[in-house]
Amino acid sequence: MTQRFPHSNSPTPQHFPVVVVGAGPAGLTVGNILRAAGVDCLVLETGTREFIERRPRAGVLEEWAVRGLERRGLAGRLLDRAERHTACEFRFAGERYRLSYQELTGSHHWVYPQHLLVTDLVREYADVRGGRIRFGVRDVRLHDLDGDRPSVSYVCPRSGRREVVACDFVAGCDGARGVTRSSVAPGRARVARHDYGIGWLALLAEAPASADCVLFGCHPDGFAGQMPRSPEVTRYYLQCPPGDDPDSWSHERVWTELRRRLAAAGAAPPVEGRLIEKRVLDMHDYVTEPMVFGRLFLAGDAAHLIAPIAAKGMNLALHDAFLLGDSLVALLTRDDDSGLAGYSRECLRRVWDYQEFSQWLSELYHGAATGDPFRSGTTLARLHRLFTSPTAAAAFAEQYLGTAARH
Ligand code: RFL
């Protein structure tokens, strides 16, 4: 809950036009946009710089998102180092089916590990654009969000004292486990949730990928996915029961299942390597509506979570951040509030579109493993349709690349 301006034991409360809570892709992009326009802001982050620059997560970026970063001067290193992906491959019923989405949409994906993007964004924000950022903060609290003098307080890791920062706006970019969403008074936000009832064992292997593109294995024993990340590291997913114990997945068991579920005629088996990350994700989504509460603007996973089924979360976080950063600049430098007024509506259109695609794709991945012969039959029909109907393939490609002219 938002709290009254607290008693401060910091010597002089400071003021920033914008306080950004969270230094992930969303928060750092907002911060960079503000700094480029000469707007002062403060980013607060619970992790250390080293920690956020090493945390592996996403890797697939849609082309419009990279163009958005490029337009804001934030894609230099990414465009030098990222890999361009133009196709994906489905494997089912022992066969492989390649879908060249670039041919269908003229658009492609970029593969660039999230922690490298975060590293680039921190460097640009803090070292190049002179933005202020406090790492390792504790117990962040939001105050007076409904007034025109909100503030954010936090415990400083060095002094152990609570510092208070007055501001005009708070950007809540602190991800799924942050505090900004829960600072909204109960009853003011509608949180829509969806639970897939499925777990994914998320793995990172020290090994090159066995194919030049993303692989989706739709197998009666469960989904398996391969997502190239870099020449040395590959991400894999294996469907498992939600809440499964990652330790029950030995090295041998993981590679046996990956080989089995990704097997197809003429396909090379996955390249075995040391597993450097192994954790179970319980697949679920949520959407918070609206995304604005007084002077608090939520962005990215703080507002909406999308299971990594269609690799959409970081793309949505960037979409929100572009809109929020540009709208705050318009208001603070030109007194134009039109962007902020439409912020929530504009973000949510793409959010719901991507959530719907994710649900649709989930059935494609997991339907064959339900044990229900009816759902197995319809899943197989859906898969075949992608490779027999150019219209169905084009619709898939448009949604997978996020290229619809309007959401
Ligand atoms: P983040 O990245 O979680 O950043 C939030 C930051 O806030 C900090 N924080 C706080 N700071 C201050 N005060 C507090 N109280 C705080 N609490 C937390 C955190 O330390 C962190 O630094 O949110 P953001 O910026 O909204 O970005 C969202 C993306 O990180 C997320 O959607 C993606 O990682 C999702 N995702 C994928 N998205 C894609 O677009 N393409 C992909 O290929 C893709 N693969 C994935 C994924 C997510 C995965 N996991 C971890 C569920 C693969 C996986 C395995």
Image (tube, rainbow, N blue to C red):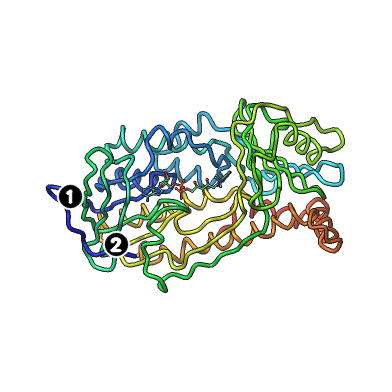
User: Dot 1 surroundings within 10 Å: few (below 14), some, or many (20 or more)?
Assistant: few
Circle 2 residue: 336
Name the amino acid, label 2. Answer: Asp
Seen at 68% across and 51% down, the residue is 397
Circle 2 SS class: loop
Q: Is residue 160 left or right of residue 282?
A: left
Q: For the image shown, how many numbered marks are present on the structure? A: 2
Q: Is residue 382 above or below residue 46?
A: below
Q: Which residue is mark 1?
A: 14
| Separation (CA) of disc 2 from disc 1 | 25 Å
Picture coordinates of residue 320, whole percent (x, y): 44, 55
Q: Residue at x 40, y 61 (%)?
A: 182
Where's residue 208, x and y in %?
66, 27
Residue 66 in the figure: left or right of residue 261: left
Image: 325 above or below 227: below
User: Residue, x 74% and y 54% (percent of image)?
Assistant: 366
Residue visible at 25% across and 48% down in the picture: 39
| Residue density around tag 2, few if under 14, some if 14–19, many if 20 or more, within 10 Å | some
| Res 278 quadrant in image | top right
The amino acid type of the residue labelled 1 equals Gln
Residue 375: percent from left, percent from top: 81, 62
Q: Residue 316, which numbered label? A: none
Foreground disc of the pair 2, 1:
1
Above/below status of 21 relative to 343: above
